[in-house]
Image (spheres, helix red, strand yellow):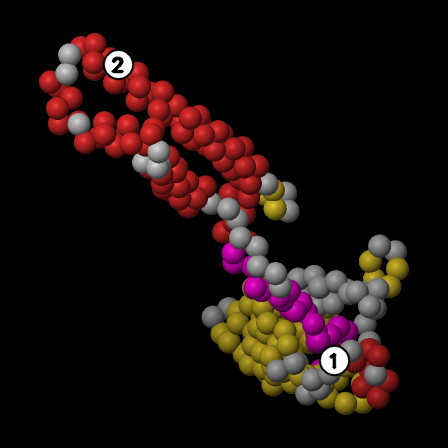
């Protein structure tokens, strides 16, 4: 990638002053009659105080006349430099002022676009049913529903450009009544699934486990989506009324809506 460097006025200003000083020196001490007059004037500086007022005035006027061309040249160069600096410092990079963006440009100039954090994503969407009874205080776990990838939005399916909302889990329990809870999913990947339900009728519920298949998209794999194979296993912990209960659970998969 081509390197871009923002112009810094503070760097070029000392160089400009040094250049003007060199030009002034070369002009005043140039070969010829005018240069000789200025050199003679410099050599005579120690005796300048001994001159009469008229001589001093004449010398000052002569010096001004001698330096006038260089002074005009210096003013012209400074004016040109000022216009150039205003143009450079006023340049905008992606809608941001160059002086503000220069540090950012320096940071990203050699970088390449980072790969999407969801590239090669794992899709576990769907319903998971326990293979054995998980009962607590008269309520039995019916199913676990996971959603971390969204294909349907804006009125149509987008399998080539899915969205990734905040992962969410739902649990359903049946007993004298049926209740469902929506839970947080702080970690979801092929080797780790953590579900946390901080406040439910049964107390605090937490599941920690892992998937037995690392490819995901079980809804698109008929050999797995019919509930014939265990795909998720872990420990379900329920803490309430001063007691903690842990259940080892295995789940089979069925496609969700």
Where residue 20 sits, quadrant-wise, is top left
Residue sitting nearer the eye, 193 or 214: 214
Mark 1 neighbour density, 10 Å: few (under 14) some (14–19) many (20 or more): some
Q: Which numbered disc covers residue 58?
A: 2
Establish if 111 lies above or below 206: above
Q: Position of residue 48 (x, y in %)?
A: 15, 21
Q: Position of residue 243 (x, y in %)?
A: 49, 74
Residue sitting nearer the eye, 5 or 81: 81
Q: Is residue 108 rendered magenta in the image?
A: yes
In the image, the segment drawn in magenta is 106-133
Residue sitting nearer the eye, 94 or 87: 87
Report the residue marked by disc 1.
216
Q: Secondary structure at mark 2?
A: helix
Asked if one can make out residue 144 in the rendered structure from this viewpoint, the answer is no
Picture mark count: 2
Q: Are marks 2 and 1 in contact (CB under 8 Å)?
A: no
Residue at the spot 51% in from the left edge and 76% down from the top edge: 244
Mark in front: 2 vs 1: 2
Where residue 212 sits, quadrant-wise, is bottom right
Looking at the image, residue 134 sits to the left or right of residue 72; the answer is: right
Q: Position of residue 202 (x, y in %)?
A: 60, 68
Residue at the spot 55% in from the left edge and 40% down from the top edge: 88
Asked if one can make out residue 141 in the rendered structure from this viewpoint, the answer is yes
Q: Position of residue 11 (x, y in %)?
A: 42, 46
Q: Secondary structure at mark 1?
A: loop
Mark 2 neighbour density, 10 Å: few (under 14) some (14–19) many (20 or more): few
Residue sitting nearer the eye, 148 or 75: 75
Residue at the spot 52% in from the left edge and 58% down from the top edge: 107
Q: Quadrant of the N terminus?
A: bottom right
Q: CA distance from mark 2 to mark 1?
A: 97 Å
User: Mark 2 vs mark 1: which is more N-terminal?
Assistant: 2
């Amino acid at each position: 990638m081509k390197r871009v460097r923002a112009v810094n006025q503070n760097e070029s200003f000392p160089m400009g002053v040094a250049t003007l000083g060199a030009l002034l020196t070369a002009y005043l001490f140039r070969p010829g009659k005018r240069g000789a007059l200025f050199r003679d004037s410099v050599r005579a500086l120690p005796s300048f105080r001994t001159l009469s007022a008229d001589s001093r005035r004449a010398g000052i006027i002569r010096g001004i006349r001698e330096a006038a061309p260089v002074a005009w040249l210096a003013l012209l160069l400074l004016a040109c430099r000022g216009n150039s600096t205003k143009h450079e410092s006023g340049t905008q990079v992606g809608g941001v002022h160059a002086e503000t963006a220069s540090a950012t440009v320096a940071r990203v100039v050699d970088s390449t676009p980072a790969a999407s954090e969801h590239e090669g994503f794992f899709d576990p969407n769907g319903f998971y049913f326990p293979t054995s009874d998980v009962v607590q205080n008269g309520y039995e776990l019916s199913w676990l529903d996971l959603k971390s990838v969204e294909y349907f939005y804006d009125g149509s399916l987008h399998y080539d450009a899915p969205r990734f909302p905040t992962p969410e889990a739902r649990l359903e329990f049946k007993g004298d009544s049926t209740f469902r809870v929506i839970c947080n999913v702080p970690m979801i990947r092929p080797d780790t699934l953590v579900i946390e339900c901080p406040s439910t009728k049964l107390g605090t519920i937490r599941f920690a486990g892992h998937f037995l298949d690392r490819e995901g998209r079980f809804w698109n794999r008929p050999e797995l989506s019919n509930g014939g194979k265990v795909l998720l296993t872990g420990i379900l912990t329920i803490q309430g009324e001063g007691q903690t209960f842990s259940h080892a659970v295995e789940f089979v998969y069925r496609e969700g809506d």
